[in-house]
Image: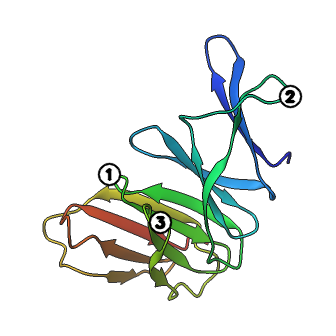
Amino acid sequence: MDRSMRVWNIPTGQCLAMAQFPTPCTSLALHPSEDSVFVGGSDGDVYAVDLVAPVPSASGTPALAAANRYVGHTGAVLSLSLSFDGSMLVSSSRDGTAKVWDCASGQALKTFTGHTKGPVSCVRGMMRPPNLLDGPAQLQTKAQTISYFADTASRRDLFAISDFP
């Protein structure tokens, strides 16, 4: 892995911009406003990259810089997902945890540690079902544990966190 993330023009095949990271990239999520991207690293950190302000580089390809770094996992970040309004990010990790982050401050709002069968491999934002109660909930099946974290302020966003074997 070359530790980079690139933005491509699909019709022309031209690389429009590139960001370099100190670690291999393991996951990616585009902000709903399409002005930034979040990149998960094998070092357990999440990098927020501003797509709006690339700077010229010696290679001729505009460079993108990581604006913020979210530190908290001890294993590779395996999956990322954003709330529909882009205010929260959820990350899953090989360390068996999932974290909900405030995008504006970069602070971890909640850490899920109950997934004991292995790495948390998948997180997804989804519309909140009206019959789901406020606050966190958990569903245990034979093969996996699925945790749900609802944003009680917006009463709209929901994250599903799973530890698929």
User: In the figure, is residue 110 to the left or right of 66?
Assistant: left
- Which one is in front in this view, the residue at disc 1 or the one at disc 2? 2
Image coordinates of residue 101 in percent, x first then y, are 46, 69
Please report whichever mark, 1 or 2, sits nearer to the chain's N-terminal start: 2
Front-most of residues 32 and 140: 32
62 in relation to 92, above or below = above
What residue did someone put label 2 on? 58
The Cα atoms of the two marked residues, 3 and 2, are separated by: 35 Å
Looking at the figure, which quarter contains the C terminus?
A: bottom right
Pointer 1 local density, CA inside 10 Å: few below 14, some 14–19, many at least 20: some
Q: Amino acid at mark 2?
A: Ala
Q: Is residue 99 above or below residue 52?
A: below
Disc 3 designates what residue?
Answer: 90
Q: Which residue bears the numbered disc 1?
A: 84
Measuring 21% from the left and 61% from the top, which residue is drawn there? 156
Hey, what amino acid is under mark 1?
Phe
